[in-house]
Image (cartoon, rainbow, N blue to C red):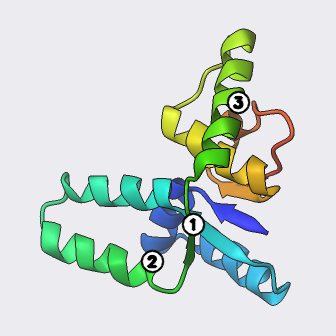
Amino acid sequence: MILLDTSFVIDLMRGNTDCMKLLQDTEAREEDVFLSTISVYELLVGVAHADNKIDEEQKIRESLSAITTIDFDKYSSYESGTIYSELKSQGSMINSFDILIAGIARRHNYSVMTRNGSDFNRINGLQVIEY
């Protein structure tokens, strides 16, 4: 099972052909694909910076309608806290939202599909699919 990182969805919405191909290959293998509620939040925050906020929000909502979301629950928060501690002790911190996404993925044993492999690859026990 695969958890899409926010960067993947942004690139997909921008028509990135590598993303489209990767998603098609994933669907052909009949792998389940999810998006975290953290990524939904990140995408909607981006609307605040858009020139045409209404159109951008509609585009995001339409793009997300076909993707199953997975919640950031109590157990994901425990896992995220552990990841934070691990990264802090290694001196290799990453973006807080990426830690939360990684916590969801590692808690459920999902792979993360992302453009930001250099960040997610710092996390022990997390499978990363980079493009």
Tell me the quarter of the image containing the N terminus: bottom right
**Label of residue 35 in the image:** 1
Q: Quadrant of residue 81?
A: top right
Give the residue displayed 60% in from the left and 41% down from the top: 77
Q: Is residue 67 above or below residue 121?
A: below
Q: Are marks 1 and 2 in contact (CB under 8 Å)?
A: yes
Disc nearer the start of the sequence (1/2)? 1
Provide residue 50's location: percent of width, then percent of height. 19, 59
Mark 2 lies on a secondary structure that is helix
Residue beneath the point at 71% across and 28% down: 82
Q: In which quadrant is the C terminus drawn?
A: bottom right
Residue bearing the label numbered 3: 83
Crowding near pointer 3: few (<14 within 10 Å), some, many (20+)? many
The numbered disc on residue 123 is none
Looking at numbered disc 2 in the image, what kind of residue is underneath it? Leu
Q: Please state which of the two labelled residues, at mark 3 or mark 2, is closer to the viewer.
A: 3
Q: Nearer the viewer, residue 19 or 5?
A: 5
Mark number for residue 64? 2
Q: Residue at x 70, y 30 (%)?
A: 83
Marks 3 and 2, how far apart at CA = 27 Å
CA gap, disc 1 and disc 2: 8 Å
Residue type at mark 3?
Ile
